[in-house]
Amino acid sequence: DYITSTHRGHGHLISKGGDIKLMMAELFGKKTGYCKGKGGSMHIADVELGILGANGIVGGGPPLAAGAALAVQYQGKDDVAVCFFGDGAANQGTTHEGMNLATCWKLPVVFVNENNMYGISSCTINSMCVADIADRAAAYDMPGVVVDGNDVMAVYEVASEAVKRAREGKGPSLIECKTYRHRGHFEGDPCVYRNKEELQEWKEKDPIPQFEKKLLDMEVLTQKKVEEIKSSLEKELAEATSFAEESPFPDVSEVTEDVYTI
């Protein structure tokens, strides 16, 4: 299976099985990173894992996902391409072209819109006339589903159905995950476009503690196991950070390597 990601795609890479050490080294601009320190935060890729790259171009992923899905279809495989994109990208022409092509050729694509309500500082209520981006799926004759993007199980169920549909050759789907961006669009963003009450309301909907509570209530996890998981993750992150800090920067003589023109 393949994924295309966004300029904020670290979670996608980790979920697809990416190496956290290589990811952190890339964030530090080090030679040991996924792209030898030249891709940076917004362009991490691991083709061997089916990660076709995070993308600094808003709306750059949908055509790539459609292309990957076309290759899969042509080769007669049952792989699926999943395209993650934000609410800002939902208004880009490339996104609509990708969805149109995918549905015309019944390509195995799942378009996942992460609607966090703001494209930089532009609120969705001021930048589009539909309350739900998923409504646009009707124009392409594909299923469009809205889901609470902070509900892990709800997202899993909806995504499973869309992936199943794509794998069976029934074409693409559009999933809109309603969620929120806790921090600014960039470090130092004053966030004057939203108020503190709104931010606090959404912080209380944080999916991680919500899912933790649900698993504890279901007795799937114990508090001891939760602490073990957190301790293990903290150790893994510390090791990745140390690896990145200790890794060398690319040599200046390599500046023109891995650079291509078309």
Image: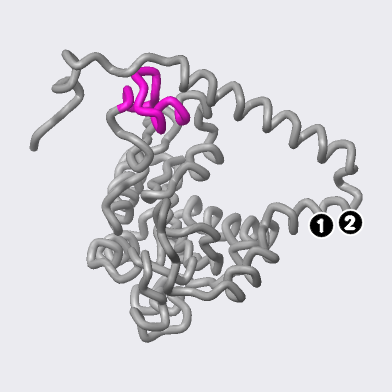
The structure residue drawn at horizontal position 35% and vertical position 68%, both measured from the top left corner, is 90
Magenta range is 23-37
| Few, some or many residues within 10 Å of mark 2 (<14, 14–19, 20+) | few
| Few, some or many residues within 10 Å of mark 1 (<14, 14–19, 20+) | some
Disc 2 is placed on an element classified as helix
State how the image is colored: one colour
Q: Quadrant of residue 193?
A: bottom left
Residue with the mark numbered 2:
217
The structure residue drawn at horizontal position 58% and vertical position 74%, both measured from the top left corner, is 198
Percent position of residue 248, x then y: 37, 14
Residue with the mark numbered 1:
214
Give residue 240's mark. none
Q: For the residues labelled 2 and 1, say whether their Cβ atoms are less than 8 Å apart.
A: yes
Which three-letter amino acid code belongs to the residue tagged 2? Asp
Marks 2 and 1, Cα distance to the nearest angstrom? 5 Å
Percent position of residue 183, x then y: 51, 57
